[in-house]
Amino acid sequence: MNSSSARGSLRADRLTVGVLLGISIIGFESLGIATALPVVSDALGGKSLYGWAFSAFLLGQLLGTVLAGTAADRIGSRRPMAVALVLFAIGLIVGTVASTMTVVVIGRAVAGAGSGAALMLNFAVIGTAYDESVRPRMIAATQTAWIMPALIGPAIAGPVAEHVSWRLVFGGLVPVLAVVAWLVLPALTTSSVAASPDSLGNSAAAERFVTATGRDRVLAAITVTAGGAALIVALDSHVVWRGVIVGAVGVGLCVFAGRVLFPAGTIRARPGLASIVLAYSLLLGGFIGIETFFPRTLDDVRGMSAFIGGLFLSGGTISWSIGAWLQSKRALWWLRPSVRTLSGLVFAAGVVAAGVLVVSGAPIPLALFGWMIAGLGMGTAFNAVTEAMYRSTPPERIGAATSATQLGGSLVGAVTAGTNGTLNNVADRLDWTPRSASWLVLAFQISVMGLVVLGVSRVRVAGE
């Protein structure tokens, strides 16, 4: 092997390690802090802002995802990734020093912007830097990168938050981000791939999604973030008429921005990228919603520690990774449409079973088993939908496609997590018992699962 080949191999290995480590850190942040947040809200007296701690993170992801995609199209991925990692670190530091729950929410928003940008850039790199024959294994590897966070993150975060300091759960990740930057930044590009006119599609709406200027996309990113925030505020409004007005404004803002940020026909699941974006958004958003449900329910209804809540999140994430590897096997490729639909059904059935078992007071191991079944279905469905996105999108459009899928998942996740918090707050104001409040939230999550199954079953890719 000559020196240039050796340098190329080293760069590729470094990129792979950097991508997987970066995703692992995002997993640590997501699972660890989700486990610690009940302790944080109790310590700072901010239970009313519990849902916003999740929603602010996801709204930050909306903004970061689009801005990173826009910047990468113009100047390559290296500088946007550097900015993303810095924002991620700043958000964690803000959370570490927070003295009120409001400051925690602000830190979560900043960290969300950084992590959303980093995650989007990592997945875009997979679509452009790896051969099609390698991508399914790389996609599966990104899901496996969540196993270590699933095993260590919640299991450590719970006891540390309860017995040492919840601030360590935030601040402990900051030094590792420096290692991620050292690994991944030198391997990223400083130029972008120009879009081919042949790949733009025929409709004006489709062309607008692909050819929108950087200014258009920045304005659309701000607009959709404001729209998502308005929807959450509307759900939490104490006055019905005010909530309806604010909610209508939020929907209008999201629809207006969606003309630039999403492929035409996304809501109708038009065959091709539009149906893929819808399915991805519902899958990820549905998972985020139910993931915020378990720690609080186990704490409020079952009186269990954050450690047990962490075990729940860990079990689902591990089985998600297993499902991802199963889907990546070539033997299943000829069953792609069937695998997607069946996997969506397994995910939904596992969520319903686990949720009912937790709230009803059934043995925790049974509920954990149901949640792991849900994770298995999620891993298979998520990987199948992601692979479909890569296979149906030319390289010069990967950035736009990845941004749309990540954006959709963050938006749906922000709404589902925010709705969970809103329903709990409404139940508190009505003096409902914690168990009754949990039944209400679970009913909402079950309705989301119905949408997930419908969305995944509607994915249509050319050649299948």
Image (cartoon, rainbow, N blue to C red):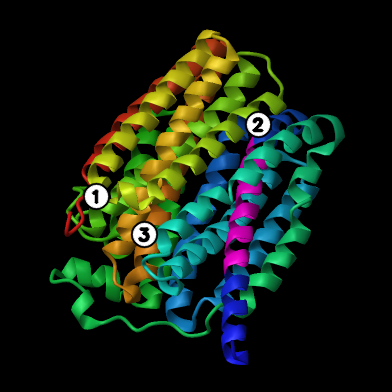
Q: In percent of the image, x 39 and y 69: which residue is there?
A: 399
Q: Dot 2, crowdedness within 10 Å: few (<14), some or many (≥20)?
A: many
Q: In percent of the image, x 78 and y 48: which residue is there?
A: 96
Q: In percent of the image, x 45 and y 28: which residue is there?
A: 373
Type of the residue with mark 3:
Ala
State how many labels appear: 3
Q: Percent from the top left, x then y, of residue 179? A: 73, 66
Q: Nearer the viewer, residue 442 or 158?
A: 158
Q: Which residue is mark 2?
A: 310
Q: Quadrant of residue 381?
A: top left
Q: What type of secondary structure mainly makes up the magenta span?
A: helix
Mark 2 or 3 closer to N-term?
2
The alpha-carbon separation of the residues under discs 2 and 3 comes to 30 Å
Which residue in the rendered view is the most extreme toward the right? 164
Q: Which residue is mark 1?
A: 334
Q: Which residue is mark 3?
A: 404
Q: In percent of the image, x 67 and y 51: which residue is there?
A: 107
The span picked out in magenta is 16-34
Type of the residue with mark 2:
Gly
The alpha-carbon separation of the residues under discs 1 and 2 comes to 36 Å
Mark 1 or 2 closer to N-term?
2
The answer to whether 71 appears left or right of 299 in the picture is left
- Where 69 sits versus 161, above or below? below
Type of the residue with mark 1:
Trp
